[in-house]
């Protein structure tokens, strides 16, 4: 059984490769500059914008995991994601490979954010969410046509070691480590559940190796503890023996900052997720597999330890 990870060098791809070793010794890592996670890994350097290379990478794969994260930019997403997924779907169908797509919650309706399940209404309030909806529909269409065996695995906002681009890592832990104030969007008094990336990777590996899990949507194990964003900041600052100081950014400030820091232009349309409780339910997975999320205090301790190295 050959398991192939497209986007193997990120915060999910790396721990996923580690977890897949329990199931197979034939793991193909695909990225621009892939690096071995396990000694037996096969490295496949590729620009995943090249359809020919994507097809070649997928050829011979029993299961293909899509964990790539393209540049966090709306125009890049609109141009890149649909074309990339069309290539992946075509290759998986042609090579009879199962697909595991790692997704986020952007496609859910704004009203679903206070309690998200696998059956929450799909009605994205953001343009990035509409891109995710398009990908979801592309996958589901091929499943319904019986052309493809696939599953969609979703995570909440996540944090953890080997994850440089997560909000909790960048805006909270990294700033506090530098002696700065933690930064946050919206209200820090709203509940915000998080997915710990090693949990997400383990769950994704389990799903990819469970035949009857396919042709469904699954939420990976995510914190049951209903902590506010400020309580997450307190956990990080507690590990650093610091006072939990925080700077919040209203939407108008993000627009101003975007003039000087281009990536900040990408956040205003997503702030709705931080202006209300954000509760991600993973009970479907927990009941099926008996695997629950790492406790927040344990995950934060491991995160801070990894960032200090």
Image (spheres, helix red, strand yellow):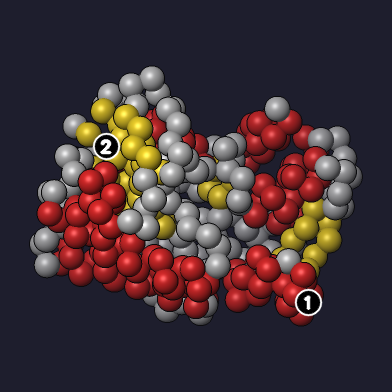
Residue 13 shows in this picture = no
Quadrant (top left, top right, bottom left, bottom right) of the N terminus: top left
Quarter occupied by residue 37: top left
Please give the label number shown on residue 151.
Answer: none
> Considering only order in the chain, which callout, 1 or 2, is on the residue closer to the N terminus?
2
Q: Determine the residue positioned at 87% across, 40% down.
A: 242
Picture mark count: 2
CB atoms of marks 2 and 1 within 8 Å? no
* Mark 2 crowdedness (10 Å alpha carbons): few <14, some 14-19, many ≥20: many
Please provide percent x and percent y for residue 251: 73, 76
Which type of secondary structure does the marked residue at label 1 adopt? helix
Give the residue number, with chain letter if any, for mark 2: 3
Please name whichever residue, 196 or 166, is drawn nearer the observer in this view of the structure. Answer: 166
Identify whether 292 is placed above or below 254.
above
Give the residue number, with chain letter if any, for mark 1: 256
Identify whether 167 is placed above or below 41.
below
Please name whichever residue, 82 or 225, is drawn nearer the observer in this view of the structure. Answer: 82
Please name whichever residue, 136 or 64, is drawn nearer the observer in this view of the structure. Answer: 64
Q: Determine the residue positioned at 65% across, 60% down.
A: 191
Marks 2 and 1 sit apart, C-alpha to C-alpha, by: 45 Å
Please provide percent x and percent y for residue 16: 41, 37
Residue 48 shows in this picture = yes
Quadrant (top left, top right, bottom left, bottom right) of the C terminus: top right
* Mark 1 crowdedness (10 Å alpha carbons): few <14, some 14-19, many ≥20: few
Which type of secondary structure does the marked residue at label 2 adopt? strand
Quarter occupied by residue 210: top left
Please provide percent x and percent y for residue 305: 69, 29
């Amino acid at each position: 059984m050959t398991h192939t990870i497209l986007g193997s060098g990120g915060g999910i791809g790396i721990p996923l490769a580690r977890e897949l070793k329990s199931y197979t010794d034939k793991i193909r890592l695909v990225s621009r500059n892939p690096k071995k996670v396990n000694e037996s890994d096969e490295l496949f350097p590729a620009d995943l914008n090249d359809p020919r290379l994507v097809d070649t990478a997928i050829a011979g794969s029993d299961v293909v995991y899509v964990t790539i994260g393209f540049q966090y930019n709306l125009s890049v997403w609109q141009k890149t994601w649909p074309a990339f997924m069309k290539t992946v779907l075509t290759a998986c169908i042609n090579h009879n490979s199962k697909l595991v797509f790692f997704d986020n919650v952007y496609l859910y309706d704004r009203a679903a954010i206070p309690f998200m399940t696998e059956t929450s209404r799909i009605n994205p309030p953001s343009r990035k969410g509409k891109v995710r909806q398009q990908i979801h529909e592309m996958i589901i269409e091929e499943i319904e046509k019986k052309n493809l065996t696939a599953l969609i695995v979703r995570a909440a906002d996540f944090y953890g070691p080997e994850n440089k681009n997560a909000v909790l890592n960048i805006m909270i832990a990294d700033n506090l480590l530098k002696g700065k104030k933690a930064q946050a969007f919206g209200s820090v008094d709203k509940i915000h559940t998080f997915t710990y990336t090693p949990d997400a990777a383990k769950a994704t590996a389990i799903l990819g190796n469970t035949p009857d899990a396919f042709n469904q949507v699954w939420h990976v194990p995510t914190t049951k503890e209903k902590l506010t964003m400020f309580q997450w900041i307190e956990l990080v600052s507690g590990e650093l023996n610091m006072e939990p100081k925080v700077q919040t950014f209203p939407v108008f400030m993000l627009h101003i900052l975007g003039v000087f820091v281009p990536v900040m232009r990408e956040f205003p349309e997503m702030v709705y997720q931080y202006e209300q409780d954000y509760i991600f339910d993973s009970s479907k997975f927990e009941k099926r597999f008996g695997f629950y999320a790492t406790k927040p205090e344990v995950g934060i301790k491991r995160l801070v330890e990894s960032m200090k190295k």
